[in-house]
Image: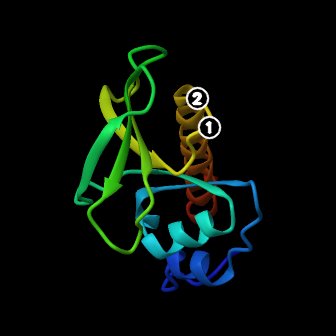
């Protein structure tokens, strides 16, 4: 959906997103909206997103054994917020390109941590593509 620049992406996602059961929605941490997460979960779908730094949580335990395929940890967590009360899965991995430890969260406990990370990384490639298109549209080279 294309909108004016003053329209919030998260508002469009919450109002217009037609959530399909058994789908995976992957978005950036700007879409950290616990109501949206609840709607996705309620629709029997999944989300994958980068964890916002100020989101408080409690680690409930290790989900699966980590330390393979670049995965640093795979933990079950609970947010310290009543707007989303279900357990989540937090996966930390080392991004080789930026040498940054990235923390992502999901409500999907079925797929492997490696697959969840690949889903998130694929989303980032799409973001880079859209930035490239935007740069070409705004300032085309002669």
**Which of the 4 quarters of the picture holds residue 110?**
top right
Q: Is residue 114 above or below residue 31?
A: above
Q: Is residue 136 above or below residue 121?
A: below
Q: Label 1's element?
A: loop
Count of labels in the image: 2
Towards the viewer: 109 or 18: 109
- Do the CB atoms of the residues marked 1 and 2 lie less than 8 Å apart? no
Towards the viewer: 54 or 81: 81
Q: Label 2's element?
A: loop
Residue 23 numbered mark, or none: none
Looking at the image, which residue is at 58% across and 29% down? Answer: 112
Q: Which residue is mark 2?
A: 112
Looking at the image, which residue is at 26% across and 63% down? Answer: 80
Looking at the image, which residue is at 25% across and 50% down? Answer: 58
Mark 1 or 2: in front is 1
Towards the viewer: 122 or 63: 63
Q: Specify the quadrant that holds the N terminus.
A: bottom right
Residue 11, x across and y down, in percent: 53, 82
At label 1, counting other C-alpha atoms closer than 10 Å, the crowd grade (few under 14, some 14-19, many 20 or more) is few
Q: Residue furthest top?
A: 68
Looking at the image, which residue is at 55% across and 41% down? Answer: 109
Residue 16, x across and y down, in percent: 68, 81
Q: Which residue is mark 1?
A: 110
Residue 79, x across and y down, in percent: 32, 59
**Which of the 4 quarters of the picture holds residue 57?**
bottom left
At label 2, counting other C-alpha atoms closer than 10 Å, the crowd grade (few under 14, some 14-19, many 20 or more) is few
Colouring chosen for the image of the structure: rainbow
Q: Separation of disc 1 and disc 2 at Cα?
A: 7 Å
**Which of the 4 quarters of the picture holds residue 85?**
bottom left
Q: Is residue 79 left or right of residue 126?
A: left
């Amino acid at each position: 959906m294309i909108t004016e620049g003053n329209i919030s992406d998260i508002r469009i996602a919450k109002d217009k997103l037609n959530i399909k059961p058994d789908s995976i929605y992957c978005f950036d941490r700007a879409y950290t909206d616990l109501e949206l997460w609840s709607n996705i979960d309620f629709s029997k779908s999944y989300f994958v997103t980068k964890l916002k730094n100020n989101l408080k949580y409690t680690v409930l335990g290790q989900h699966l054994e980590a330390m393979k395929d670049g995965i640093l940890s795979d933990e079950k967590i609970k947010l310290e917020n009543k707007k989303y009360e279900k357990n989540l899965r937090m996966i930390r991995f080392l991004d080789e390109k930026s040498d940054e430890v990235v923390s992502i969260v999901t409500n999907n406990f079925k797929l492997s941590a490696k697959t969840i990370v690949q889903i998130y990384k694929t989303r980032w490639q799409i973001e880079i593509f859209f930035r490239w298109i935007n740069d070409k549209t705004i300032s085309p080279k002669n």
